[in-house]
Amino acid sequence: MSDFDLNAELEIGRLGQRGEGLARRNGEIIAVPYALPGEIVRAEIDGERAKLVDVIRPSADRIAPFCPHYTICGGCAVQNLAPSAYEQWKRGLVVEALTRAKIDTEIAPLIDAHGAGRRRVTFHSRVIDEGAGRKRLDLGFMQARAHKIIAIDTCPILDPALARAVIAAREAATALIPLEKPLDIIVTATLEGLDIDLRGSGALDFQYRQALITIAERNDLARISNHGDIIIERRAPILQMGRALVAIPPGGFLQATAAGEDMLASLVREGAKGAKKIADLFAGSGTFALRLAELAEIVAIEFDEPAAKALARASAYAQGLRPVKVEQRNLFTRPLMGGELDGFDAVVFDPPRAGAEAQSKMLAASKVPLVIGVSCALQSFTRDARILIDGGYRLEKVTPVDQFRHSAHVELVGIFRRQPEAKTKRRGRLLG
């Protein structure tokens, strides 16, 4: 097969893990973004990837994308696939990953948790020197598989509360043009207004801080920060988590949509029903801990200090919650050990994409009867699930949750229950 072909005709067999159409040619797999299964397309092949040029025979599942930036910006991978086929593909990613790991379990139907849309967005800005002393600001999203910024005025997958986000982000980036630094501008919709955290500018002197304060006032922002350093907080950026109100730290971890957070928390609560004492590991600012505390005593462990403090403050002021003990700890290097785990009726963990390998090994050797794993990464989830299963747990059910609609990302909630015979065998080995 030639490594480069400007006019290749390909038949798409299936969608890949990134949402691209996959075709086979001369024994090689070619990835064709935006092509759909069953289609015959014309494409420009460059190695293992190809650029879609024309759809010769479209799929019956092809629909018109709703965003004018689709195929240009790098945000959405699959907007042109009919809903039923899309749901089948996305749930199929989970089925494929668990099958490949030889894990047999019930896989629930995909739950749509897009809700009102994404409540956080990251804009990128670059200062372009046009010569003759002229500089241009590019602000928007990164082009798919490129370093070019695509300017946008609006994004239809965002929560309407972010409608003015691009205006405020552009004003902030414009004020910092003289620094000539590439910026990432994180904007979060909160109950008290927009919260902006700038990344990439370095320390800012007085004139730039004053300019950003003026922008915050003109745009009625709740807060504006520079890499976590608060420049002005006009109102505390608040999110509701169960009965608690959480003042979130700048740029801290957040579930992508409010509907997604509610659904994941509901699944975790249902799975933990009846537990009296629960450990919430990688707890963040309290997504699960603050809701579980309505039912049980909670020990919440989080490494990030601002997130841990936000959780502790929220739990202290919320009404109707059982005790919540918050501990700051790095669970990658210091996972909870056997003696620390054995007093819990259930353990919930929601780690970053790297997963919870060290903690899973400790859980596999523990007496904890119930483990609930939440994950946004199929590869690390299946690895951690295998560790728990080999340690005597049964994965009863996995529920896929789609809060990253039109992307290849999928959230999972897995319910692991320790088997009585496994406990007996494990104790026998320890005694022997």
Image (cartoon, helix red, strand yellow):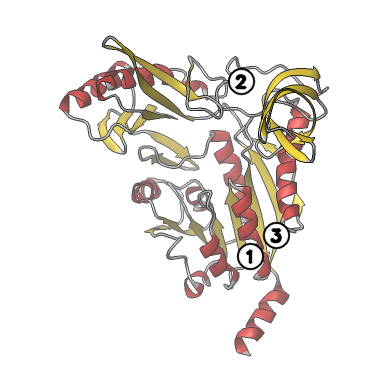
Residue 270 visible to the viewer: no
| Residue occupying the point 67% across, 70% down | 392
Residue 70's disc number: 2
Quick one: label 3 or label 1, which is nearer the N terminus? 1
Residue 388 numbered mark, or none:
1
Image quadrant in which the C terminus is located: bottom right
Three-letter code for the amino acid on which mark 2 is drawn: Tyr
The residue that disc 3 covers is: 395
Look at the numbered disc 1 and give the secondary structure of its residue.
Answer: helix
Q: Is residue 129 left or right of 153 when viewed as pictured? A: left
The image position of residue 34, as x and y in percent, is 69, 25
Marks 3 and 2: which is nearer the front? 2
Q: Position of residue 295 (x, y in %)?
A: 54, 54
In this rendering, would 396 be left or right of 278? right
- Number of residue marks: 3
Q: Of residues 23 and 60, which is closer to you in this image?
A: 23
Residue farthest left in this picture: 206
Q: Which amino acid does label 3 sit on?
A: Leu
Calculate the distance from the C-alpha at mark 1 to the C-alpha at mark 2.
40 Å
Crowd class of label 1 (few under 14; some 14 to 19; many from 20; radius 10 Å): many
Report how far apart the C-alphas of labels 3 and 1 lie in the structure. 8 Å
Decide: marks 3, 1 in contact (CB < 8 A)?
Answer: yes
In three-dimensional space, the C-alpha distance between marks 3 and 2, rounded to whole angstroms, equals 38 Å
